[in-house]
């Protein structure tokens, strides 16, 4: 059976969620989980996994431009570990260095208002990181 891949852009305030199609060809932004408004973000991720028949998860790993891992990278690694222990699914880390920048640029070019950008940027960053992962495994 074919399973989808979930992409997560983990941030201090929000978690952007993206989902692959069943073939693992394309990524679409799904939703943004507000960590302040959601009591248990991992439970919400678990619900989405059930709902969309997810077989694996890719978590963005923000690295510094020189390839080192800073505090936000450490937080993402800890989050990925929590997911591995809680969800019983393969969890991979994926270099996401320029995804948020790329998402921001795309939204600016599309002339999306600042308020709207804030609502969709994390979801879009998750889709960009998941798409780059899907492209890398399709080769």
Image: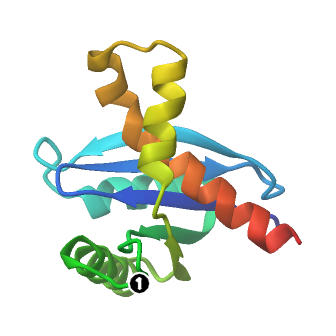
Camera-nearest residue between 11 and 46: 11
User: Residue 120's spot in the image, x, y percent?
Assistant: 40, 30
User: Residue 102's spot in the image, x, y percent?
Assistant: 51, 43
Q: Quadrant of residue 121?
A: top left
* Screen quadrant of the C terminus: bottom right
Placement of 133 over or under 69, stated as above or below = above
Which residue ends up furthest to the front in the rendered image? 66
Question: Quick check: can you spot residue 25?
Answer: yes
Camera-nearest residue between 129 and 5: 129
User: Label 1 neighbourhood size at 10 Å, few (<14), some (14-19), many (20+)?
Assistant: some
Q: Quadrant of residue 85?
A: bottom left
The residue that mark 1 highlights is: 84
Placement of 49 over or under 86, stated as above or below = above
Placement of 51 over or under 64, stated as above or below = above
Question: Residue at 53% across / 73% down in the picture?
Answer: 94
Q: Is residue 50 left or right of residue 72?
A: right
Question: Residue at 35% across / 12% down in the picture?
Answer: 113
User: Residue 134's spot in the image, x, y percent?
Assistant: 73, 63
Question: Residue at 54% across / 39% down in the picture?
Answer: 29
Q: Is residue 39 left or right of residue 86?
A: left
Question: Residue at 30% across / 76% down in the picture?
Answer: 73
* Screen quadrant of the N terminus: bottom right
Question: Quick check: can you spot residue 3?
Answer: no
Instruction: Determine whether the residue tagged by mark 1 lies in a helix, strand or loop.
Output: helix
Q: Quadrant of residue 97?
A: bottom left
Label count reads 1
User: Residue 18's spot in the image, x, y percent?
Assistant: 53, 48
Which residue ends up furthest to the right in the rendered image? 139
Is the image coloured rainbow, by chain, by secondary structure, or in one colour? rainbow
Q: Is residue 121 left or right of residue 136?
A: left
């Amino acid at each position: 059976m074919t399973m989808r891949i979930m992409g997560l852009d983990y941030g201090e305030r929000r978690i952007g969620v993206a989902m692959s199609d069943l073939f693992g060809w394309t990524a679409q932004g799904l939703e943004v989980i507000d960590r302040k408004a959601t009591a248990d973000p991992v439970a919400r991720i678990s619900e989405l996994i059930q709902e969309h028949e997810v077989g694996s998860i890719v978590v963005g790993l923000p690295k510094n431009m020189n390839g080192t891992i800073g505090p936000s990278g450490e937080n993402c690694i800890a989050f990925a570990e929590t997911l591995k222990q809680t969800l019983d699914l393969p969890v991979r880390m994926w270099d996401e260095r320029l995804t948020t920048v790329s998402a921001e640029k795309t939204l600016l070019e599309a002339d999306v208002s600042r308020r709207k950008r804030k609502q969709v940027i994390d979801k879009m960053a998750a889709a960009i990181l998941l798409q780059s992962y899907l492209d890398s495994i399709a080769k």
